[in-house]
Amino acid sequence: MQKSRLEAFSDGVIAIIITIMVLELRPPSQADFAALAPLTSKFISYILSFIYLGIYWNNHHHLWQVVQNVNGRVLWANLLLLFWLSLIPFVTSWMGETDFAKIPVLCYGFVLIMAAFAYFLMVLALVANHGKDSTLVKALGNGNKEKISLGIYSAAIILAFLNPYFSLALYALVAVIWFVPDQRIEKQL
């Protein structure tokens, strides 16, 4: 099975997710800068989520450069990733609306960790489809960034009960870790 339909579908879903997020940002009715102040939490939430979606889109694109073909298991794993990514607008809006209250920040982290886990399952499905000696496996390496990210997400979820701003800082840290596209794949190409 060719990979092009899966790539196009994934690109479209991510574009729709970003569109939904931006539609949640309602402009103020007043025409001065002071009117923007109440939107600060919403805008910070949007920026963080936009960066996350950009990172997923970018790394998905890089990963699929070494993918040769897909099977049903890969399709379902990719759909699971898109499911978790599709929840980002909801938790983004909730966080922004509540000025980073504990439970919404915790739920944001839960969606992020589940998206990371779904990405991991998609990679496992791709490895099973391509074999242990494939370029894909060589490009993936040891997965240290992935393990570090899961650890940081776990800590952030727990810290949300103590101070949600610590959690936000950790979510931002993971985004910084992943902001530069993964060079492992490009080295293999």
Image (spheres, grey):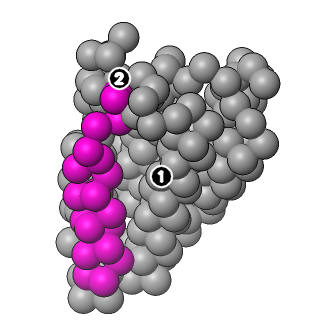
Lower position in the chain sequence, tag 1 or tag 2 = 1
| Callout 2 secondary element | helix
| Callout 1 secondary element | helix
Q: Is residue 141 visible?
A: yes
Viewer-nearest residue: 23 or 140: 140
Viewer-nearest residue: 38 or 65: 65
Residue in view at x 42 percent, y 30 percent: 133
Q: Where residue 53 sits in the image (x, y, percent)? A: 49, 41
**Label annotation for residue 120:** 1
Residue in view at x 47 percent, y 52 percent: 120
* Magenta segment boundaries in residue numbering: 138-159
Question: Mark 2 sits on what residue?
Answer: 185
Q: Where residue 12 sits in the image (x, y, percent)? A: 71, 29
Q: Residue furthest top?
A: 189
Where 93 sits versus 72, above or below?
A: below
Q: How far apart are marks 1 and 2 (CA)?
A: 16 Å
Q: Which of the 4 image quarters holds residue 140?
A: top left
Q: Which amino acid does label 1 sit on?
A: Phe
Residue in view at x 27 percent, y 16 percent: 187
Where 17 sits versus 167, above or below?
A: above
Q: Is residue 149 magenta?
A: yes
Dominant secondary-structure state across the stretch colored magenta:
helix
Q: What residue type is labelled 2?
A: Ile
In what quadrant of the picture does the N terminus appear? top right
From the viewer's perspective, tell me whether residue 71 is left or right of residue 121. right
Where 62 sits versus 162, above or below?
A: above
